[in-house]
Amino acid sequence: MKTKVEIKNLLQNAKLKNTTPRVVILETLLNIKHPETAGEIHKRLKKNKIDLVTLYRTLASFEKNKLVKRVDLHKDAIYYELDLDHHHHIVCTKCNKLERFENSEIEKVLNKIISKSVKFKNIKEHSLELFGICKKCA
Amino acid sequence: MKTKVEIKNLLQNAKLKNTTPRVVILETLLNIKHPETAGEIHKRLKKNKIDLVTLYRTLASFEKNKLVKRVDLHKDAIYYELDLDHHHHIVCTKCNKLERFENSEIEKVLNKIISKSVKFKNIKEHSLELFGICKKCA
DNA sequence: ATACAATTGCAAACAATTTGCAATTGGAAA
DNA sequence: TTTCCAATTGCAAATTGTTTGCAATTGTAT
Ligand SMILES: [Mn+2]
Ligand SMILES: [Mn+2]
Ligand SMILES: [Zn+2]
Ligand SMILES: [Zn+2]
């Protein structure tokens, strides 16, 4: 759990004004364990009366500042997630269960791939999600 | 290049009726080198008067039958691509240049990951795209 | 305290995608 | 072949997710 001060610093480092909506949204994102859509995140903000438009704009600026990333779950909306620690997901296409994972070997192989590339010489970021049927659903 | 007969077989194997729209869409997809949105694909079909709705429905059924996959390019629309040969992409976030790649080592590591998973015991599919700045743009 | 750019909320617009339904079609069965 | 029916299609309309315009508010540097 991050303190108020740490949250304030996250914003400051990104040169973003320390506004109530941003703090509330950041706190909320810190409490979310898995990627959610703007609509889902907005529900969590209900009490705080923060407009959905503000949420979209905030997510966009957080994304630009690498605080937040989009995760493609092969659904029909964009999923957002705090991007403070790099990780990936395995998704059950039946019950939507999600498991996070990180794997240093993958990251190494990705670097090898880029070194083989004709057109590229470095990667800024990457997306990697696995889809399958979980043990429970199988 | 696939023959008419091969296209027909692709549909037959998927137990999909061999209709004109489907054949035309499949032929079109075979000619596209990189992922495109439904709108972009639809433009290529203009002469054939195939409705955009039909294209959406066709893409959905092709997707279900593993003929087509969605590719997340971190844009604001869904990109589709024929999925006959498994591969991934590197994308230039500046000029949108795309490079395809395949890498057997990655696939091996992914299998290792799944074997470590608590909740999952196999993967059906995965998405992996790399983002960066191409040599020309750098 | 003041000043101004950055941010916000609300209403409205937009784009992409989906749904309902009647007409058409492909292919299995007669 | 001809018949029959479920699957598929096209058109119009609806829905969903997301973005834009603009006036009012807020944060922070002076
Ligand atoms: Mn990674
Ligand atoms: Mn792969
Ligand atoms: Zn499951
Ligand atoms: Zn480039």
Image: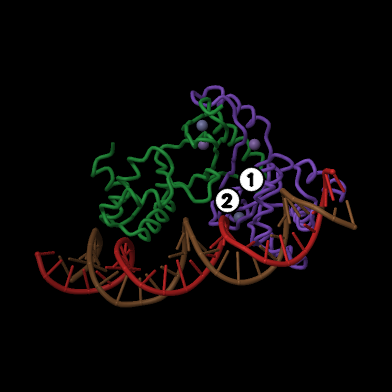
Chain colours: A purple, B green, C brown, D red
The answer to whether residue B31 is above or below residue A97 is above
Rendering coords of residue B65 (x, y %): 41, 51
> Which residue lies at the image location 30% right of the left edge and 51% below the top edge?
B45
Q: Secondary structure at mark 2?
A: loop
The answer to whether residue A48 is above or below residue B128 is below
Cα separation, mark 1 vs mark 2, equals: 9 Å
Q: Residues within 10 Å of mark 1 (few under 14, many from 20)?
A: many
Residue A66 image-quadrant placement:
top right
Q: Tell me the chain of label 1.
A: A
Rendering coords of residue A61 (x, y %): 67, 48
Frontmost residue, A98 versus B55 = B55
Q: Secondary structure at mark 1?
A: strand
Going by the numbered disc 2, the residue's amino acid type is: Leu
N-term-proximal mark, 1 vs 2: 2
Frontmost residue, A39 versus A9 = A9
The answer to whether residue A114 is above or below residue A132 is above
Frontmost residue, A33 versus A64 = A64
Frontmost residue, A136 versus A16 = A16
Residue B30 image-quadrant placement:
top left
Rendering coords of residue B138 (x, y %): 56, 26
Judged left or right of residue A137, residue A83 is right
Confirm or deny contact between disc 1 and disc 2 (CB under 8 A). yes
The dot on residue A73 is 2
Q: Tell me the chain of label 2.
A: A
Q: Residues within 10 Å of mark 2 (few under 14, many from 20)?
A: many
> Which residue lies at the image location 78% right of the left edge and 46% below the top edge?
A11
Rendering coords of residue B24 (x, y %): 28, 50
Q: Which residue is mark 1?
A: A89
